Image: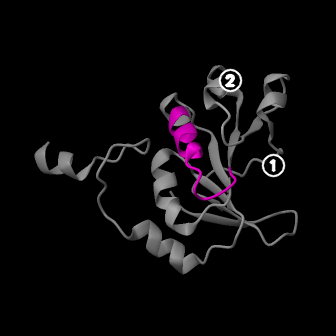
Amino acid sequence: MALHDIANEAGTDETLLRFRDDEPHDEPAVTLESFLGQSNATAVRIEAGEDARALLVHLDRIALIEIGFPTFRDGRGYSAARVLREAGYTGELRAEGDVLVDQLPLMRRCGFDSFAPAAAIDAAVLDRALTRYQNVYQSAADGRAPVWKLRHG
């Protein structure tokens, strides 16, 4: 899947990094509380600490789930992403906020395929981060076989 680097349509310095071949979803994401209280939204935002499992019965009608990262040290979004992907969510899953370049490979393994980092990410640094390691050591939502399984079957 190719990386699509799309400038933010609002004209800001933010960049949207996408690892999807479909068109970006242009509907703004509503809060989880708002989403659960209405029937027509197709994009929702989950904040740190909110339970992604509340969306499981609605996954078939959601095109974009944005997960907020208030600080790079807050890992709750990783768990939310994996819960959603393991439940069968195939739509766009975006990490937004304090997302660092060295976190992107791990976020991709958890199921994120779109990123809206608060700070710009250098393309060459991103490429090195994404191609640095050929093998992985544990199972994750991306379905890659761990190196131990490649060695021992």
Q: Which mark is residue 5?
A: none
**Disc 2 marks which amino acid?**
His
Identify which residue is drawn at 52% across, 77% down.
125
In magenta segment, residue 65: no
Q: Which residue bears the numbered disc 1? A: 26
Q: Residue furthest left?
A: 152
Q: Position of residue 145 (x, y in %)?
A: 28, 46
Q: Residue furthest front?
A: 73
Q: Which residue bears the numbered disc 2? A: 58
Q: Position of residue 7 (x, y in %)?
A: 76, 68
The answer to whether 61 appears left or right of 134 in the picture is right
| Crowd around label 2: few <14 · some 14–19 · many ≥20 (10 Å) | some
The answer to whether 105 appears left or right of 4 in the picture is left
Q: Position of residue 28 (x, y in %)?
A: 83, 45
Which span of residues is magenta-colored?
69-83
**Disc 1 marks which amino acid?**
Asp
> Vertical placement of 43 versus 114: above or below?
above
The answer to whether 27 appears left or right of 20 in the picture is right
Is the residue under label 1 in contact with that under label 2 (CB below 8 Å)? no
Secondary structure at badge 1 equals: loop
Q: Position of residue 95 (x, y in %)?
A: 64, 52
